[in-house]
Amino acid sequence: MIISAQVVKELRDQTGAGMMDCKKALVDSNGDIEKALEFLRKSGIAKAEKKGSREAKEGIVYSYIHHGGRLGVLVELNCETDFVARTDGFKDLAHNLALQIAATNPVAVSQKDVPEDLIVKEKEIYSSQAKESGKPENIIDKIVEGRVQKYFQEICLLEQPFIKDPDKHVGDLITEAVTILGENISVGRYIRFALGESIVTNNGQA
């Protein structure tokens, strides 16, 4: 099947993927751009998972001060090389992460960074609420687990819906950046300052 250069370019503009990857995706999907997009997305996730085991010791500390100077965020974003750390795509990702942290005030980078005592406390609350509402004992555990997962989406940076596009999670932004930039990328730590509020900080690897 012949795929025109214009269609390949259109797909590349939408995804940021390489020209050869775009052409292969279009060939495999018989020229259907929607199917090609899905193919690239799945392929990108697979590639990102492979890159996730590589060390990310370079990066930047990005600062964001909200208008009026009453709120600020510092976020450490790591990658594998200084070259990628200097790219606009990497800096744009750091900026979006800082905006997310400023807006949502997450407790942790990912689920594994949430303090165990906090999870236990939340489970006790959800279990008590379920029992008080008369839910059968045999489904209370499932209800609690579902509410805990929703809680993670509220407090974990990578689990949160992205403020600029709620159809994506923040973790999806990092996966997309890994696919485009070709390196492992991780959130090292962040700190959020708000005038008159206690400081929220998090150390972790994601």
Image (cartoon, helix red, strand yellow):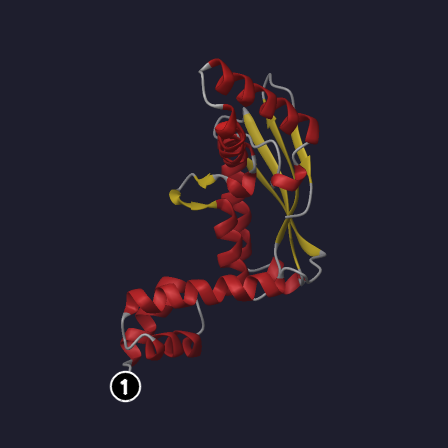
Residue 32, given in percent of the width and then of the height, sits at: 27, 71
Q: Nearer the viewer, residue 111 or 137?
A: 137
Side (left or right) of 74 relative to 142: right
Residue 89 visible from this viewpoint: no
Q: Amino acid at mark 1?
A: Ile
Q: How many marks?
A: 1
Side (left or right) of 44 relative to 109: left
Asked which secondary structure carries label 1, the reply is loop
In this view, 179 is above or below 195 = below
Q: Which residue is mark 1?
A: 2
Q: Name the residue located 47 percent from the left edge and 67 percent from the top edge.
A: 43
Residue 31, given in percent of the width and then of the height, sits at: 27, 76
Q: Name the residue located 44 percent from the left edge and 68 percent from the top edge.
A: 17
Q: Name the residue located 55 percent from the left edge and 17 percent from the top edge.
A: 128
Q: Nearer the viewer, residue 28 or 13?
A: 28
Residue 8 visible from this viewpoint: yes
Q: Nearer the viewer, residue 94 or 121?
A: 121
Residue 7, given in percent of the width and then of the height, sits at: 28, 74
